[in-house]
Amino acid sequence: EIVLTQSPATLSLSPGERATLSCRASQSVSSYLAWYQQKPGQAPRLLIYDASNRATGIPARFSGSGSGTDFTLTISSLEPEDFAVYYCQQRSNWPPAFGQGTRLEIK
Amino acid sequence: EVQLVESGGGLVQPGGSLRLSCAASGFTFSSYWMHWVRQAPGKGLVWVSRINSDGSSTSYADSVKGRFTISRDNAKNTLYLQMNSLRAEDTAVYYCARDGNLQDVDAFDIWGQGTMVTVSS
């Protein structure tokens, strides 16, 4: 079973700054990695699939990169609505595991 | 509008049973694989179960295997999760989610709002 480790656990930044979130897999997942955003009391929302493809309606400030075992979600310039928890998920092997999440909070 | 709406959550005693439902609308439900994902209070997302488009194939997380059963009624556009022998550690918000693989989106592209299940005496 593939384990995903996200870092940092918490990231404190200000609006307008650049955010870089990391997800590392215990073995290669090729490019089968997705990123989700979850705000308090809401369901997760798909941001990125296949490591670098933005889902429908996702702003261009969100971008994903990486392959194999190391992946990055970048938010180029933080908007107030971007402060949330972010999860990565691998779709390479069964079961489709999630990382433990990175909380992006306002500094 | 593409939508998933869960129902059926509530308070149940340890050892009890509950059936969750997920009503789909705005898309051809019968064409998509579907999943259940849960989230314990203050914790992360955990995949629970999956069913293929015609219901002929299912899979489960080890933690629920033998206790939970996923099913679907494509005529009613509804996904189900039958939960038996419930334990305190099953307490969570349960989300249904659509698998986007039909559109080459290797991810869960649509999520319901979730339904809370609390297992407590």
Image: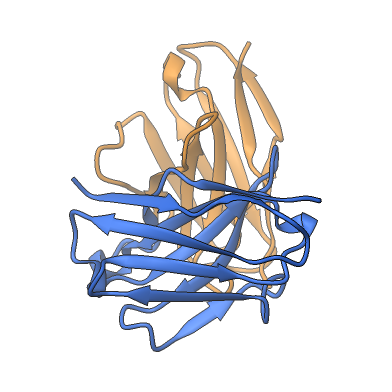
* Chain appearing in orange on the rendered image: A
A39 displayed left or right of B98: right
Tell me which residue sits at (48%, 38%) in the image.
Answer: A37
A89 displayed left or right of B24: right
Task: Pick the quarter of the image with the N terminus of chain A.
Answer: bottom right
Is residue A52 at least partly visible in the picture?
no
Q: Nearer the viewer, residue B114 or A56?
A: B114
- Name which quarter of the figure residue A10 lies in: top right
Looking at the picture, does residue B8 appear above or below residue A13?
below
Q: Position of residue A97 (x, y in %)?
A: 60, 62
Q: Nearer the viewer, residue A18 or A9?
A: A9
A53 displayed left or right of A72: left
Q: How many marks?
A: 0
Tell me which residue sits at (67%, 76%) in the image.
Answer: B67
Tell me which residue sits at (48%, 35%) in the image.
Answer: A42
- Name which quarter of the figure residue A28 lies in: bottom right
* Chain appearing in blue on the rendered image: B
Is residue B46 at least partly visible in the picture?
yes
Task: Pick the quarter of the image with the C terminus of chain A.
Answer: top right
Q: Position of residue A50 (x, y in %)?
A: 40, 58
Looking at the picture, does residue B27 appear above or below residue A43?
below
- Name which quarter of the figure residue B15 lies in: bottom right
Q: Position of residue B26 (x, y in %)?
A: 18, 54
Looking at the picture, does residue A74 appear above or below residue B101?
above
